[in-house]
Amino acid sequence: MHIEPGLVDGVKIVLSYATALGAFGGATKMSYDTIRVSGAAPYALRSVIATALVFCFFEVLPHHPVGVSEVHLILGSTLLLLFGAGPAAVGLSLGLLLQGLFFAPFDLPQYGMNVTTLLVPLFAINQIAKRIIPEQTPYVDVTYRQTFALSTAYQGGIVLWVGFWALYGQGFTAANVANVATFGVAYMSVVLVEPLLDLAVLGTAKSWRKFTDGPAFVGRLHRAA
């Protein structure tokens, strides 16, 4: 998915197990918060939908190897705004795992690194959303500036984590640093597309409120906090 096989190996890969445990801890906390507010059934439904979407993001949408990893259109901010933090975290974790199990088993040893790379930026934009989107604003009414901030933070977080794993695994050689830089530049190009997709998806949700105002989507999509 993100980290190329062999980029981090040997005893160094043990660190990824620790970071993954921390990421799962954060996902568990956000899931608990979602269940406490929305109930277990809506949480489960949103998690299933988010997982299916993430799996499609990895396997159906275009993805290209660049530098130390691959460039994907993951749409982390879209998942957050549609389903909430807990289901988005589950979707990213399980969608990544299913992709590895069924289509890319060679990625499974890197699962700890990859899931950390996806989840930690999600935790960050969940907090950013609370700061930049007023409580009285439903998600369908967010602005381009707000979606751009969320997308930039999420994609930037992914680039930072991929760069960390690459430099941790292979060191600060000229070739490795150049590959990290190449990946970072290519990946941040996603920021040019994702905010527009966010607004398009949210606009559709607003127009189709009778279909999107229900347990399959986070309540904040149409209502103030």
Image (cartoon, rainbow, N blue to C red):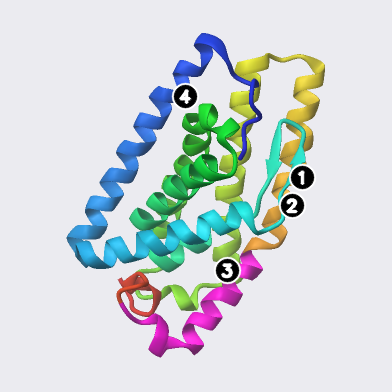
Residue 186 badge: 1
Which quadrant is home to the C terminus?
bottom left
Question: What's the amino acid at mark 1?
Answer: Ala
Label 3 to label 4, Cα distance in Å? Answer: 31 Å
Q: In this picture, is 25 found above or below 6?
A: below
Contact, mark 1 vs mark 2 (Cβ under 8 Å) = yes
Question: What's the amino acid at mark 4?
Answer: Ser
Q: Mark 4 packing: few (<14 Cα in 10 Å), some, or many (20+)?
A: many
Contact, mark 2 vs mark 4 (Cβ under 8 Å) = no
Question: What's the amino acid at mark 2?
Answer: Ser
SS for callout 2:
helix
Question: What's the amino acid at mark 3?
Answer: Asp
Label 1 to label 4, Cα distance in Å? Answer: 24 Å
* Residue at numbered disc 2: 189
Mark positioned earlier in the residue sequence (3 or 2)? 2
Label 1 to label 2, Cα distance in Å? Answer: 5 Å
Residue range (magenta) = 195-214
Residue 95 visible in image: yes
* Residue at numbered disc 4: 16
